Image: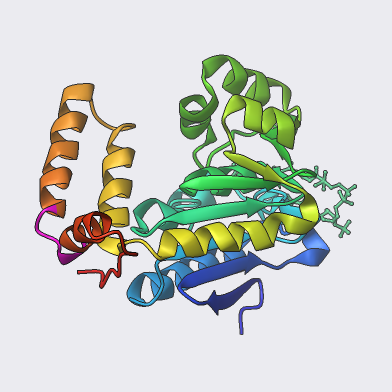
Amino acid sequence: MNTAVLKEIVGQVGILTINRPDAMNALNDDVMNGLTLGLDEFEQNDAIHCVIITGSEKVFAAGADIAAMRNYEYIDVYRDNFITRNWERLKTFRKPTIAAVSGYALGGGCEVAMMCDMVFAADNAKFSQPEVRIATLPGAGATQRLPRSVGKAVAMDLCFTGRMLTAAEALQFGLVSRVYPKAELMHETLEQAQAIAAYSLPVLMMMKESLNRAFETPLNEGLAFERKMLYATFALEDRKEGMNAFIEKRPANFNNR
Ligand code: CAA
């Protein structure tokens, strides 16, 4: 059994917890395969509307597993499709995801957090891309996602120096959207995830698809896509229910159709 990722379901929220306490939650194949399988399962489970990815209080993840990587040659990473083979499931996952980061989110850990739709941090969280110190690249997306998230100046600064950001700096730079006291991170994240999960899942999925277009298309194409998604909501029972509930001054009861 793969214990490197623990799986839990609370109401309509799926939680995946990275669990390699002896290695600072370093992201080896067990972890990345565990996350991939967990996401596959949560994607197929219609009862789950939102997913949280987290680690321990001390460490979200200290990056790719350096002990596993140290003896790799070029042919190993090229032939085995390192990273691409089992790090990218979050990229195609269609439901909302939240990274709940307490402690270190370093290297690949920060990159996994950035693959999530939102990042909530505990006040002890520390973010960095320290790969420069071991003479490799942040190769699980940070050279692309970090500039889109925090802008070129901060991204270059972080990658060239490997310095750590505090949770407060991460909030200031827009890498995270919320910071909570450490003891409250999971409770607050779960509460927010449940609130999101109570909305119409197809609407959340359309929103996610549309928001992600902002990073991949010129403005006019993105706007055209958004408009198609807007029109698509008019085919949903939930859209009628949402508007009717508003006019009738009652809570909406979405059936996710
Ligand atoms: N890979 C493998 N093992 C790791 C690890 C990693 N990324 N990070 C920590 N560990 C291991 C340590 O080797 C140590 O193992 P032993 O007990 O067997 O010696 C154990 O976890 C505890 O770590 P430390 O003794 O270093 O603990 P600390 O409290 O002094 O420091 C830390 C904690 C600041 C997180 C420090 O461990 C650290 O800097 N880790 C490495 C961070 C790093 O360089 N990450 C980038 C990896 S490369 C990457 O991610 C590339 C990519 O984009 C794909």
In this image, 134 relative to 100: left or right? right
Q: Nearer the viewer, residue 242 or 14?
A: 242
**What residue span does the magenta drawing correspond to?**
234-238
Residue 180, how many percent across, how many down?
A: 71, 47
Quadrant in the picture for the N terminus: bottom right
Point 72% across, 28% down: residue: 162
Residue 42, how many percent across, how many down?
A: 42, 72
- Which quadrant of the figure has residue 135? top right
Q: Is residue 64 above or below residue 237?
A: above
In this image, 115 relative to 218: left or right? right
Point 79% across, 60% down: residue: 23
In this image, 160 relative to 153: left or right? right
- Most frequent secondary structure within the magenta stretch: loop
Asked if residue 8 lies in the magenta stretch, the reply is no
| Residue found at the very far bottom of the displayed protein | 1
| Residue found at the very far top of the displayed protein | 153
Q: How many marks?
A: 0
Residue 51, how many percent across, how many down?
A: 49, 63
Point 33% across, 76% down: residue: 46
Residue 72, how many percent across, how many down?
A: 62, 50
Residue 36 in sight in this render: yes
Q: Nearer the viewer, residue 66 or 2?
A: 2
Quadrant in the picture for the C terminus: bottom left
Q: Nearer the viewer, residue 191 or 73?
A: 191
Q: Nearer the viewer, residue 73 or 187?
A: 187
Q: Is residue 172 above or below residue 129?
A: above
Point 67% across, 62% down: residue: 187
